[in-house]
Image (cartoon, grey):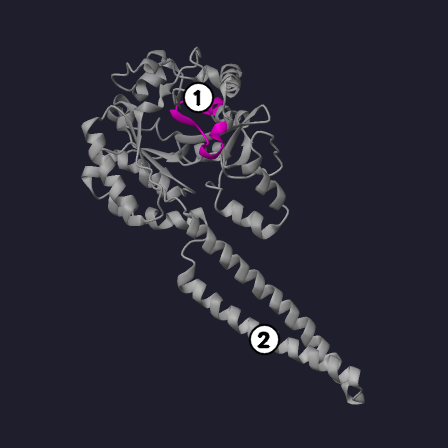
Amino acid sequence: MKYIIYEMMWMNNMTDNLKSIPINKLIIPGTHNSAINTLDFSVKSETNKKILLYGQKTSFFYPINNILKRWTITQEKTIHDQLLNGIRYFDIRISYLNNEIFATHTYVAKMFVHVLDEFVEFMEKINSEIIIIRVRKDFENKKSFDNYASVKLNNILLNHKINKYIYPIKFYKQNQLNIFPSYNEFIKSRKMVLYIFDSNTLPSESIVDFILDDYIVDDWIDTSNLEKKMNKINDTIEKIKMDNNKIYEMNLILTPQDNDIINDVVCEIIDLSLILCLYLFIIFGLAVFLTRDISKNKTFFTVHVRNIYIFVLIIIIVAIIVILVFYSIKKCTFLKYNSIDNLNRSLIDKFPVLMLDPNIVNNLNVIIVDFPNNNIINNIINLNNKK
């Protein structure tokens, strides 16, 4: 039986059958690096100079700033707006910098406490939706995440308003999880948020309720190659079929490689070179035009100055022609992707084909995407009708 989708309350509108099955049997839309819809280059750090210094020094220069953002920002909308659009699974990466916990993706986006505020803002209006929050240390900054950071994080979680919404799951931390709770069990408790942490992110004595990261199986692979990614998805499906008491993340994510970013940098240089040459063409073209009468005096100085202007103008014209040739080549073949969003479009375009495979649909749980639009979110939610 079909159910009507209201993005803000789609779980509440599920059929009774779906409300009674474990949450790892539902198909849930999620986002990758969920908090990274902006970057803050103003954050300075003594503990992580190598990572942050480049961003701080170049943030004033628009082309470099723009490239950093294109290959770092993974979401268009805030956490709160993602919730309103139906996203229910969130991947949050954190770093410890300047005695604070930040949501980061190599570079800083915002303070972690402000991320939690967005969840609370939604929960205070709508408390009928399960929200799963997976918190991990940001790979590039994990060395700075020490025992002090764990204690700091623990205190934030315990003292934040979100704590009253956390589902009580103490025994899950000891690998005693036999079955995930259902939607009905969440509703009965009136605590709708489920935390997922790895074992060393919080202090061992922490009383925060969470599920261990061991219960997550994902198909992430460090590649921007579509074929390799598809093979990884199929391999992971086979693994999850043998142990279906876990949350399976299907990541519709391709990871940018060095050559993708280098190509983008080269193309940015081509663009800037073209703009510069056009400016110079205008300047020296005007110089040649304005000196046309002066050259009639045929003094040594005026003749040679005008000849220099003409010579430079010819060089600029040749440069423009060469750049335009490169420009056309890069548009056709050289630049395949110029951002994380464009990179992942090729994989998202495969989504309808993937969903025709019952072997995949029957083992799906969480589908992770960058820059999800309403269409892809609704398509993911509607897959529950096939359960």
Q: Is residue 284 depicted above or below 118 in this figure? A: below
Disc 1, SS: loop
Q: Is residue 381 depicted above or below 176 in this figure? A: below
Disc 2, SS: helix
Measured from the top left, where is residue 191 in percent x and y?
A: 40, 17
Inter-mark Cα distance, 2 to 1: 59 Å
Is residue 362 visible from the viewing direction of this image? no
Question: In the rendered image, which residue does mark 2 sit on?
Answer: 317
Measured from the top left, where is residue 10 in percent x and y?
A: 36, 31
Q: Give the position of the N terminus as an image quadrant.
A: top left
Rate crowding at label 2 as few (under 14), some (14 to 19) or many (20 or more) other CA atoms within 10 Å: some
Q: Residue at x 61, y 68 (%)?
A: 277
The region drawn magenta spans 123-143
Measured from the top left, where is residue 238 in percent x and y?
A: 20, 35
Measured from the top left, where is residue 340 in percent x and y?
A: 43, 46
Nearest the camera: 364 or 41?
A: 41
Q: Earlier in the sequence, mark 2 or mark 1?
A: 1
Q: Residue at x 43, y 66 (%)?
A: 329
Rate crowding at label 1 as few (under 14), some (14 to 19) or many (20 or more) other CA atoms within 10 Å: some
Q: Which mark is on residue 201? A: 1
Q: Give the position of the C terminus as an image quadrant.
A: top left
Left or right of 246, for residue 89: right
The stretch drawn in magenta includes residue 131? yes
Q: Residue at x 42, y 52 (%)?
A: 259
Is residue 205 visible from the viewing direction of this image? yes
The stretch drawn in magenta includes residue 364? no
Nearest the camera: 88 or 288?
A: 288
Residue type marked 1: Thr
Disc 2 to disc 1: CB gap under 8 Å: no
Nearest the camera: 150 or 215?
A: 150
Residue type marked 2: Ile
Q: Is residue 18 depicted above or below 336 in this figure? A: above
